[in-house]
Amino acid sequence: MARIADLLAAGPTYSFEFFPPKNDTEQATLVRTLRELEPLEPSFVSVTYRGGRASRQRTYDLVVGMLKTTALTPMAHLTCVAHTRLELAEILVDFRKAGIENVLALGGDPVSEPDLPEAELRFADELVELAHAIGGFSIGVAAHPELHPRSNGDRAADRARLAAKLRRADFAITQFFFRVDDYLGLVDDLRREGVDKPVLPGIMPITNLRSAQRMAELSGCAVPAEVVARVEAVADDADAVWRVGVEMATELCQGLMAEGAPGLHFYTLNRSTATREIYANLGLAPAA
Ligand code: FAD
């Protein structure tokens, strides 16, 4: 087990994000994906969290399972939504007891489940403070290159809040985006606020234009016209769409690394092929 802050201090990190499976089919897919991605020796992997009753346990179980049965360094996501402060403190204590040292502290997306408590913490920065109070964690936070969807376009306020949050955390991971300049704009804004903590760019290859556009809408980021045009030019051929998606993600990663990004964080959606192809294109796969 390693602390992500220490891994980042030692050099670029390459990490993969997964969501906890909800049924046996998803479980089988994830097991296969982990088997295919573990040989790439990622610096760490992260596991998303939903505030609903059943899903809470799933993140814990998956992260602890990874700790016990793989060589991976896992990070648990945790969100403020639908939790009391005491519940969040209990979850963090359970994480520490299980040996989990890395946590991504998030505001969280709304959960539509009846009879859950009102969130007592409103924003991620309060969860960062709680994790500090429990102690022993390397703490990450989320960043949004194209601003958080609820920021109403108020760039200065959104960046100032992110800077304040990141000052108290060890690193940030971004929402996915498609232009190197969006990432550089975020990092520049943070520097102007006096914050130079590592910001890991989140990479999501487009393998299907419609679902990428749907996800982008939900996440408050735009799929740029030039990206849409490249995919639409081959829209009739699913294999070509895949190829172009991997090619564009590879170019994005190359641009980010050339600009000195401290690593790359891949949104895998619990599949391995696109990530493995980008890894190979970047020459990152460990020698056999
Ligand atoms: P927060 O820091 O909580 O900020 C949210 C908004 O409130 C911003 O507009 C901010 O400017 C504003 N704000 C912050 N502090 C204040 C303040 N003190 N006063 C007034 N306004 C304030 N969601 C999940 O549910 N589960 C996950 O596992 C998950 N993983 C994610 C991983 C990554 C890498 C990313 C980028 C996002 C993830 N999300 C996840 C989504 C995230 O929870 C949502 O973006 C959520 O809407 C906000 O959480 P946050 O931590 O990004 O923002």
Image (tube, rainbow, N blue to C red):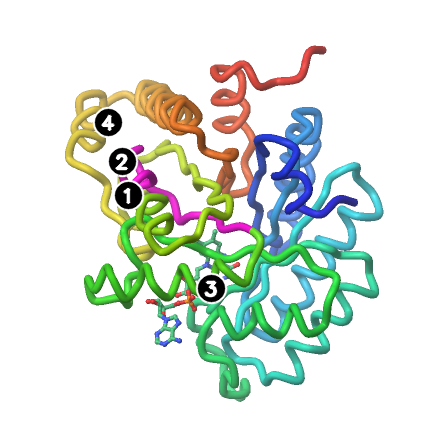
Residue identified by numbered label 3: 165
Mark 4 or 2: in front is: 2
Q: CA distance from mark 2 to mark 1?
A: 6 Å
Q: Amino acid at mark 2?
A: Asp
Q: Amino acid at mark 1?
A: Gly
Residue identified by numbered label 4: 231
Mark 4 touching mark 2, by CB under 8 A? Answer: no
The range drawn in magenta is 171-184
Give above or below for 192 relative to 160. above
Looking at marks 3 and 1 on the same chain, the residue that comes earlier in the sequence is marked by 3
Give above or below for 243 relative to 18. above
Q: Is residue 83 left or right of residue 110?
A: right
- Tell me the residue at 50%/83% (across/down): 119
Q: Is residue 1 left or right of residue 210?
A: right
Q: Is residue 172 left or right of residue 94?
A: left
Q: Amino acid at mark 4?
A: Val
Q: Position of residue 196 (x, y in %)?
A: 46, 47
Q: Residues within 10 Å of mark 4 (few under 14, many from 20)?
A: many
Q: Secondary structure at mark 2?
A: helix
Viewer-nearest residue: 217 or 72: 72
Q: Secondary structure at mark 1?
A: helix
Mark 2 touching mark 1, by CB under 8 A? Answer: yes
| The residue carrying mark 3 has its beta carbon less than 8 Å from ligand 1 | yes
Q: CA distance from mark 3 to mark 1?
A: 18 Å
State which quadrant residue 6 falls in: top right
Q: Secondary structure at mark 4?
A: helix
